[in-house]
Image (cartoon, rainbow, N blue to C red):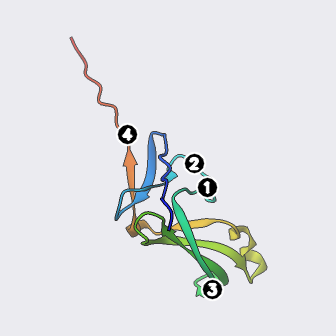
Amino acid sequence: MGRIFLVELKGRSYYKCRFCNSHLALADSVLSWVLVNIMLGPQEERLMLSGMHTVEDIFCCCCGQIVGWKYVAAHDKNQKYKEGKFVLERYRIGKYVFELLVSVFF
Protein backbone atom coordinates (compact mmCIF):
# COMPACT_ATOMS: atom_id res chain seq x y z
CA MET A 1 0.00 0.00 0.00
CA GLY A 2 1.24 3.49 -0.80
CA ARG A 3 1.59 6.47 1.44
CA ILE A 4 -1.62 8.18 2.58
CA PHE A 5 -1.81 11.94 2.08
CA LEU A 6 -4.46 13.54 4.26
CA VAL A 7 -6.30 16.72 3.32
CA GLU A 8 -6.55 19.36 6.05
CA LEU A 9 -9.66 21.50 5.81
CA LYS A 10 -9.43 25.22 6.44
CA GLY A 11 -12.52 26.73 8.00
CA ARG A 12 -14.16 27.84 11.20
CA SER A 13 -15.65 24.41 11.89
CA TYR A 14 -15.38 20.94 10.39
CA TYR A 15 -16.32 17.34 11.05
CA LYS A 16 -13.57 14.87 11.91
CA CYS A 17 -13.21 11.15 12.54
CA ARG A 18 -13.86 10.46 16.22
CA PHE A 19 -11.21 7.73 16.29
CA CYS A 20 -8.19 9.41 14.65
CA ASN A 21 -9.22 13.11 14.20
CA SER A 22 -8.80 13.11 10.40
CA HIS A 23 -10.76 15.90 8.71
CA LEU A 24 -13.88 14.73 6.84
CA ALA A 25 -16.06 17.70 5.84
CA LEU A 26 -16.64 21.39 6.47
CA ALA A 27 -19.52 21.93 8.90
CA ASP A 28 -20.55 25.19 7.22
CA SER A 29 -21.13 23.49 3.87
CA VAL A 30 -24.71 22.48 3.14
CA LEU A 31 -23.60 20.19 0.33
CA SER A 32 -23.61 16.62 1.57
CA TRP A 33 -21.60 15.17 -1.32
CA VAL A 34 -18.24 16.82 -0.58
CA LEU A 35 -16.06 14.73 1.75
CA VAL A 36 -12.29 14.24 2.05
CA ASN A 37 -10.03 11.56 3.55
CA ILE A 38 -12.50 8.72 2.94
CA MET A 39 -12.63 5.37 1.13
CA LEU A 40 -15.79 3.77 -0.23
CA GLY A 41 -16.73 0.15 0.35
CA PRO A 42 -18.52 -2.16 -2.08
CA GLN A 43 -22.09 -1.46 -3.14
CA GLU A 44 -24.78 -3.39 -1.31
CA GLU A 45 -28.56 -3.42 -1.07
CA ARG A 46 -29.80 -2.21 2.32
CA LEU A 47 -33.33 -1.93 3.69
CA MET A 48 -33.67 1.38 5.53
CA LEU A 49 -36.61 3.12 7.16
CA SER A 50 -37.33 4.95 3.89
CA GLY A 51 -37.18 1.79 1.75
CA MET A 52 -34.63 -0.24 -0.20
CA HIS A 53 -31.44 1.57 -1.27
CA THR A 54 -28.13 0.69 -2.88
CA VAL A 55 -25.44 2.11 -0.60
CA GLU A 56 -21.67 2.12 -0.07
CA ASP A 57 -20.14 2.34 3.39
CA ILE A 58 -17.76 5.27 4.01
CA PHE A 59 -14.48 4.46 5.76
CA CYS A 60 -11.93 6.87 7.24
CA CYS A 61 -8.81 6.51 5.06
CA CYS A 62 -6.51 6.93 8.06
CA CYS A 63 -7.87 4.46 10.64
CA GLY A 64 -10.32 2.40 8.55
CA GLN A 65 -13.36 2.92 10.80
CA ILE A 66 -16.82 3.17 9.23
CA VAL A 67 -18.03 6.78 9.54
CA GLY A 68 -21.24 6.60 7.47
CA TRP A 69 -22.63 5.63 4.06
CA LYS A 70 -23.28 6.97 0.57
CA TYR A 71 -26.59 6.59 -1.26
CA VAL A 72 -25.85 5.16 -4.71
CA ALA A 73 -29.39 4.38 -5.89
CA ALA A 74 -32.90 4.57 -4.49
CA HIS A 75 -35.51 2.03 -5.58
CA ASP A 76 -38.44 4.31 -4.71
CA LYS A 77 -38.91 7.30 -7.02
CA ASN A 78 -39.76 9.52 -4.01
CA GLN A 79 -36.28 8.87 -2.57
CA LYS A 80 -34.24 9.68 -5.72
CA TYR A 81 -33.09 13.00 -4.20
CA LYS A 82 -30.78 11.04 -1.87
CA GLU A 83 -28.70 9.53 -4.69
CA GLY A 84 -25.05 10.58 -4.58
CA LYS A 85 -25.32 12.05 -1.06
CA PHE A 86 -23.37 11.07 2.03
CA VAL A 87 -24.59 10.44 5.57
CA LEU A 88 -22.13 10.72 8.47
CA GLU A 89 -23.13 8.85 11.62
CA ARG A 90 -23.19 11.25 14.57
CA TYR A 91 -21.57 8.89 17.09
CA ARG A 92 -18.65 8.15 14.72
CA ILE A 93 -17.62 11.75 14.03
CA GLY A 94 -16.66 14.77 16.07
CA LYS A 95 -17.01 18.46 15.34
CA TYR A 96 -14.20 20.97 15.68
CA VAL A 97 -15.24 24.57 16.16
CA PHE A 98 -12.67 27.35 16.04
CA GLU A 99 -13.46 29.73 18.85
CA LEU A 100 -11.88 33.11 18.97
CA LEU A 101 -11.31 34.34 22.49
CA VAL A 102 -11.85 38.05 22.69
CA SER A 103 -10.42 40.05 25.56
CA VAL A 104 -11.97 43.35 26.43
CA PHE A 105 -9.70 45.92 27.99
CA PHE A 106 -11.07 48.92 29.88
- Which label number is shown at residue 98? 4
Location of the C terminus (image quadrant): top left
Amino acid type of disc 1?
Val
Q: Nearer the viewer, mark 3 or mark 2?
A: 3
Label 3, on which residue?
44
The answer for how far apart the CA atoms under marks 4 and 3 are is 37 Å
**For marks 3 and 2 on the same chain, the one whose residue lies earlier in the sequence:** 2
Above or below residue 96? Residue 18 is below
Marks 4, 1: nearer the viewer: 1
Inspect the image, locate mark 3, and give the three-letter code of the amino acid beneath it.
Glu
Q: Distance between the residues labelled 1 and 2?
A: 9 Å
**Label for residue 34?**
1
User: Residue 76 in the image: x percent, y percent?
Assistant: 75, 82
- Looking at the rendered structure, the secondary structure element under dot 1 is loop
| Distance CA(mark 3)–CA(mark 1) | 21 Å
The residue identified by callout 2 is 29
